[in-house]
Amino acid sequence: MHNFAKLGLFAAITTILSIPSISVHAQTPPASTATDITPASMNMLGREGDALASRAGLWDVVETAWSRPGATPEIIRGQVSERRMVGLYLQELLHPSADAVGKDVNRLDYLGFNRVTGRWEYLSMDARVAVGLMPAWSFDKDNVERIRVQFDPFVVPGSGDVITGQLLRMEQVYEKSGPDNEVKNQYFILADGSGMKWLAHQYIYTRRNVQ
């Protein structure tokens, strides 16, 4: 029996060795499908970052605000946007122009593309409203000419002399119609059971030609 066991083990080894070898290289994706993305490249501007960098400079801004669906719009002119790249992010400082009267606009925000997660990231702080820091993200990669980001639900204190508090959702959409023209729309949905979405703020950007 012992000899038969040895013969059985020998036969099994012989069978295994007789199986044609499989080339490891045969399972490697062809060179045409290989990616050039490396950990170091994740911290480079890339196509999306280059598109943001092209927005740097001075822009004149006209803001239109609707406090509720169907409300009479309030138009705020005389705003200036100063944009510059800070690393991978486009920094925007929005403030009144030098000749603006009675305008109390002071907002700072950052927009960038995270090449690791493959989506846009945004953060803003608006001194006009007590809502704190407002982060937002896109759902997917989006087109560099039309960027959409969604905010976590947040609470606004309300208006007037009484703090009422109102939870709402917000979506922000950047749309470029040319190298010197851009529109940023902010859509609100109140947590009141209606699910109604309306355009609450619109910022129209026109690049200022600095001589």
Image (tube, rainbow, N blue to C red):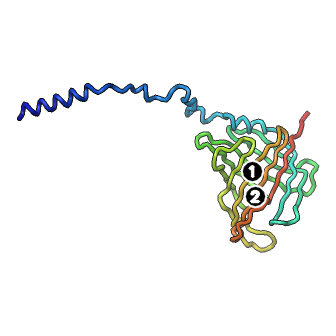
For this rendering, which residue is in front, 124 or 66?
A: 66
The residue positioned 80% from the left and 73% from the top of the image is 161
Q: Where is the C terminus found, in terms of image quarters? A: top right
**Residue 66 placement (x, y as % from top left):** 83, 62
**Residue 119 placement (x, y as % from top left):** 63, 45
The residue positioned 63% from the left and 42% from the top of the image is 114
Q: Quadrant of residue 153?
A: bottom right
Question: Gap between marks 1 and 2, in whole Å?
Answer: 8 Å
Dot 1 falls on a residue whose secondary structure is strand
Q: Do callouts 1 and 2 mark residues in contact (Cβ within 8 Å)?
A: yes
The 10 Å Cα crowd at callout 1, few under 14, some 14 to 19, many 20 or more, is some
The residue that label 2 is drawn on is 187
The residue that label 1 is drawn on is 173
The 10 Å Cα crowd at callout 2, few under 14, some 14 to 19, many 20 or more, is some
Q: Is residue 5 left or right of residue 96?
A: left
For this rendering, which residue is in front, 113 or 80?
A: 113
For this rendering, which residue is in front, 75 or 185?
A: 185
Q: Quadrant of residue 144?
A: top right
Where 60 sits versus 162, above or below?
Answer: above
Residue extending farthest to the bottom is 162
Residue 140 badge: none
The residue type indicated by label 1 comes to Val
Work out whether mark 1 precedes mark 2 in sequence or the reverse, and give the earlier one: 1
Where 22 sits versus 43, above or below?
Answer: above
